[in-house]
């Protein structure tokens, strides 16, 4: 396995172990939202001053597949760090499957123009290993995840095989995910999760309302960027615990929303993110916003 791939795996493993050591999910809301806020907090510390783009759902699903094949202390730490619920592996898999079932709109609705959400998983395992049939049955039944033996020594062919599957699942939006030089004879397995989402804004941004505006980045430097804007009624709230404002932008035909969190202070992002990391329970804050906030006209920039 390449140094880059090894570092990535060690980073994720270290983050999950750190979360397992600091969280007590029996006394706090378990699940994907809590995992997402904790993971973001850990990454924000390690990547201070940099932009962060991540999919907690993809990471959690991929590592859940690893948990289902793990034993002993490794399994215990993964279960705690991922905030997985259930007495045993079968129950954990069933609960996760219920969440993933929401990601099959593409199959359920034949509307080509409607919203699409697809969640796909696959496990690529070195030929020298044979997966237990019980594990294959568990992930196939609950995750629709196929396990496939590949020859990692033929790195170019195997990378092409994996990348072709990813391209197909994401409608050609993600290409060349795996570099051939990241695979070698030491590679044991690759867990791949692909999420594809496409939907229209419920309230679209008109092309004529895009302007150059100043944006202040980390460190206080101003840069000019193309900024979309519109005026409409949106769900809006103020979160004093985070020293931030929040607004929801809904998509057409789905309950998925684009949630925007904006610090009230120009350089207040770091302080707001410190609050996001565990000390403020985001789902509770947003529920309060939804029930108490008035619908009002906001100019989104």
Image: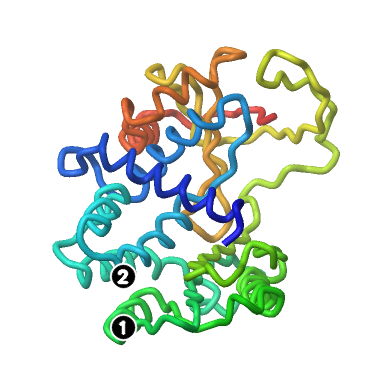
How crowded pointer 2 is (Cα within 10 Å; few <14, some 14-19, many 20+) is rated as some
Residue 230 lies, with reference to residue 142, above or below; the image says above
Residue found at the very far bottom of the displayed protein: 133
In terms of depth relative to the viewer, which is nearer, 50 or 10?
Answer: 10
- For residue 178, side relative to residue 257 (left or right): right
Q: Element under label 2?
A: loop
Residue at 23% across, 65% down: 71
Residue 132 bears which disc, if any?
Answer: 1
Residue 29 x/y as whole percent: 24, 42
In terms of depth relative to the viewer, which is nearer, 301 or 3?
Answer: 3
How crowded pointer 1 is (Cα within 10 Å; few <14, some 14-19, many 20+) is rated as few
Q: Element under label 1?
A: loop
Disc 2: which residue: 69
Do callouts 1 and 2 mark residues in contact (Cβ within 8 Å)? yes
Q: Quadrant of the N terminus?
A: bottom right
Q: In which quarter of the image is residue 100?
A: bottom left
Residue 205 x/y as whole percent: 73, 43
């Amino acid at each position: 396995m390449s140094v880059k791939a090894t570092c990535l795996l060690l980073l994720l493993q270290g983050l999950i172990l750190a979360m397992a050591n600091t969280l007590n999910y029996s006394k706090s809301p378990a699940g994907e939202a809590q995992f997402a806020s904790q993971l973001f907090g850990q990454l924000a510390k390690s990547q201070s001053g940099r932009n962060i783009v991540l999919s907690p759902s993809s990471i959690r699903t991929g590592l859940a597949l690893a948990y289902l094949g793990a034993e002993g202390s490794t399994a215990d730490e993964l279960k705690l760090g991922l905030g997985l619920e259930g007495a045993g592996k079968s129950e954990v898999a069933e609960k996760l499957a219920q969440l993933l079932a929401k990601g099959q709109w593409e199959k359920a609705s034949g509307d080509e123009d409607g919203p699409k959400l697809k969640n796909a998983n696959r496990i690529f395992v070195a030929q020298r290993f044979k997966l237990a049939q019980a594990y294959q049955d568990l992930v196939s039944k609950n995750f629709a995840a196929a396990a496939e033996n590949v020859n990692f020594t033929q790195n170019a062919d195997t990378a092409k095989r994996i990348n072709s599957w990813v391209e197909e699942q994401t409608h050609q939006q993600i290409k060349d995910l795996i570099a051939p030089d990241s695979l070698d004879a030491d590679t044991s397995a690759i867990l791949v999760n692909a999420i594809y989402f496409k939907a229209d804004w419920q309230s679209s941004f008109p092309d004529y309302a895009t302007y150059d505006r100043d944006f202040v980045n980390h460190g206080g430097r101003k840069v000019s960027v193309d900024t979309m804007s519109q005026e409409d009624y949106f769900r809006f709230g103020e979160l004093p615990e985070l020293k931030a404002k929040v607004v929801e932008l809904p998509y057409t035909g789905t309950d998925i929303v684009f949630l925007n969190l904006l610090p009230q202070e120009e350089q207040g992002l770091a302080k707001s993110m410190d609050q996001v990391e565990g000390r403020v329970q985001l789902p509770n804050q947003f529920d309060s916003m939804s029930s108490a906030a008035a619908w009002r006209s906001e100019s989104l920039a």
